[in-house]
Image: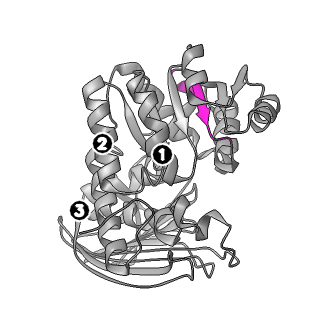
Amino acid sequence: MSDTDDPRGGAEPVLALPTSTVPDPSTAPGLRWGVISPGHIADQFTATAHRATTSRIVSVVSRSARRAEEFAARHGIEASGDSVEQMLAQGGLDAVYIASPHAQHHALARPVLEAGIPVLVEKAFTLNTAQARELLELAHERGVFAMEAMWARFLPQYDVLRQLLAEGMLGEVVEVAADHGQSFPVDPRHRMYAPELGGGALLDLGVYPVSFAQMVLGSLGELAVRGELTETGVDAYVGLLARGELGGRARLSATLRARTPTEAVVSGTRGSARLSGPFFAPGTLTVSLLDGRSATFEHPGDRGDGMAYEIAEAARRITAGDRESPLMSWKDTLDVMGTMDAMRAELGVVYPGEEFA
């Protein structure tokens, strides 16, 4: 970080932000991926991998063989089927991406890890901490890479944010504020309202603010939770005030009932850093200091290729023989899941087969 004279000729110093250290995703090793559950997010993952990385999806499975066939035809994928066992029996995979609703993550990831194949699992990683811990213990036993697909953490603007926080540019962090609200019409059959699919605002939308706050502040404690439930018993709105183990407070919210700004702001004693909405996607980081200086960082590539960075990170780690990424470590995943468990327990949201003490 350095200050220089204003290039326009004035004497006012210009704020210089750190330079992103994130490598171009196209330079990462290319892996042969399998995809489980070919829905909307798997479509994005596959298109992005083929367009912006050297990795290729070579197999896809769905409970519907026809759906898998259509997905394979659309993306030029070699093999398709209707079971994970079939995919694993065919072999030839370097990694598997699991894109199903989170209620299915545990059951789908387990046989992949047992087969010794690395997994990238969509967020939320599982329904609860117990499921997450079981999968990560299995990955440890088998010496296999596993990572939660929290794609935001691998973006260049997050790298710049982590650097400027480490340098103390914002001073002491006082608060992290983040929201994520989307408007979903009330429909008991929709996955967002279905308890059996892990529905509710928190696990699908709130995981982004919670994970962002955990990245900045560390594990969250002293939780104060408020919210309201849908008629199906999942959370329609949830708000959280918490304290981070590294200092500072978190003020977070998520809802199914309204589209909110979906921004994230880190405020410190010397200034603030704002990630424009949606804060978890490629966009703009704006830093404003109390001395009047400010600067912005813009995503360097195509904003449609945001998922390429997590694909590239997984490919690099897997090729290196690592079991986890420091950018979304196993501890990070367990911390976030633990916070969300506590939030759901406070609201009384319990999914089929779960028990909270």
Q: Nearer the viewer, residue 33 or 168?
A: 33
Q: Residue 81's quadrant in the figure?
A: top right
Q: Secondary structure at mark 3?
A: loop
* Residue situated in front as seen by the camera: 298 or 209: 209
* Left or right position of 196 against 190: left
Near mark 1 (Cα within 10 A), the count class, few <14, some 14-19 or many ≥20, is many
The residue beneath circle 1 is: 105
Percent position of residue 61, x then y: 65, 32
Q: Does residue 318 lie above or below 286 as drawn?
A: above
The magenta stretch is 26-38
Report crowding for label 2: few under 14, some 14 to 19, many 20 or more residues within 10 A (C-alpha).
few
Q: Nearer the viewer, mark 2 or mark 3?
A: 2
> Mark 2 belongs to which amino acid?
Glu
The residue positioned 40% from the left and 49% from the top of the image is: 159
The quarter in which the N terminus is drawn is: bottom left
- Kindly identify which residue carries mark 3: 219
Say if the magenta span includes residue 30: yes
- Mark 1–mark 3 distance (CA, rounded to whole Å): 23 Å
Instruction: Give how far apart the Cα atoms at labels 2 and 1 are.
Output: 12 Å
The amino acid type, in three-letter code, at marker 1 is His
| Mark 2 or mark 3, earlier in chain | 2
- Residue 117 falls left or right of residue 259: left
Please give the residue where the numbered disc 2 appears in the rendered image: 134
Q: Is residue 180 left or right of residue 170?
A: right
- Please tell me which of labels 2 and 1 falls first in the chain: 1
